[in-house]
Image (cartoon, grey):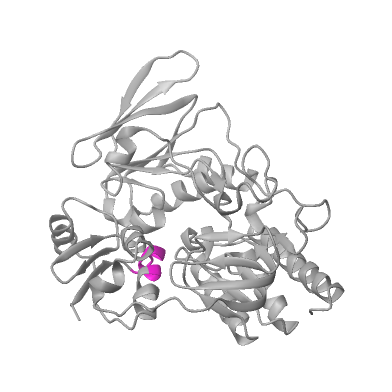
Amino acid sequence: MPSIEMYTKSWCPYCDRAKRLLTEKGQTWTEIDVENDADRQREMVERAGGRTSVPQIFIGDRHVGGFDDMAELERKGELDPLLGVRRAEAGEAEHARVVIVGSGPAGWTAAIYAARAELEPVVIAGLQFGGQLMLTTDVENYPGFPEGVTGPDMMDQFQKQAERFGARVILEDATSLDLSQRPFRIETEERAFTADSVIVSTGASARWLGIESEQRLMNRGVSACATCDGALYRDKAMAVVGGGDTAMEEALFLTRYATKVTVIHRRDELRASKIMQERAFANEKIEFLWDSEVAEVLGDDGVTGVRVKNTKTGETSEVEVEALFIAIGHKPNTDVVRGQLELDDVGYIKVEPGTTRTAIEGVFASGDAMDPVYRQAVTAAGTGCMAAIDAERWLAEQGIG
């Protein structure tokens, strides 16, 4: 087997995902912590061709890149050959009474309830297991954690609780769902399941600005995860795009490292909750650039600044920063059911009011995939509970439970 080297830092959810995937494949690796080692940081950037985000993964003499790059190899079926691992041959589809697609607060809660009801659920957790909370430093508003908890720690506890009651977890992406007939069919790259009922808990993903320079400088100063990459720009000026709670959380976190954090927002007031606004306004390191949007990210091999356009006057100006963090909201991950389940204009799954039932009998939806209003961890968990109970009752009506 080829040797594996991974550049990491102590609080890095993408690093944790990479380690979990490699562990699932029976791999070991040499870990190089770059958080407080400037020489190692420079070494990583040089070896990675200018990429500054963690993790940076090397398998043998090949630079794979970050977790997303390794996950893409896994989706294409190219990771196992690179690791020297024999890829399992697809067999007959396995049957389950409940298959849960997704593994954020909604998916794990649905798994806990379904497992305790002895439905033996299968959780297709995905390569991006844990959902958006895997990118959250401190969760302070979830009941039962008076001192707060990190998102990854919370999701790890949720998963262990689900597995304790008998949920089976598959760390693969669902590549297709066939909801046209029962039993339903769910496929990943490596296996297939049939299911009497399905709970869709696929969550949502971060939105990007959608400009060429953003993509060109991705991992070279442009990021959607301050907690992953903020420490790499210690003692430098940074910017955050957005005006909601996530943007304020990112900006406040970055003040640990930055000389200054500029919040760029397209309106003249924030959407963030009052307490998050108060914290941001009170922090002397945070400045606000109102009525502005990023027109271009400046730099060749790394970010040197951003060109912003005033949304009211049309005037442009430049802000010197060496890192740009995008926090402008999320889109529901519902492409896998598009054309089968009824979606709203944005892509959220429509459910019967007061329930998690979709228009297809036996298919239920929970979490941010169906919630365009609240989008909180606690409400996602609540709808996960509802979906499991709805599924359990529906299966009992069919004589399957």
Pick out the residue farthest to the right: 397
Closer to the camera in the image, 12 or 184: 184
Q: Position of residue 56 (x, y in %)?
A: 25, 62
Res 269 seen here: yes
- Above or below 49: residue 141: below
Q: Quadrant of residue 89?
A: bottom left
Q: Residue at x 48, y 79 (%)?
A: 91
The N terminus - image quarter = bottom left
Stretch of the chain drawn in magenta: 10-17
Q: Looking at the magenta stretch, what is its main secondary structure?
A: helix
Q: Is residue 253 magenta?
A: no
Q: Position of residue 267 (x, y in %)?
A: 54, 27
Res 234 seen here: no
Closer to the camera in the image, 200 or 4: 200
Q: Residue at x 37, y 58 (%)?
A: 228
- Above or below 394: residue 329: above
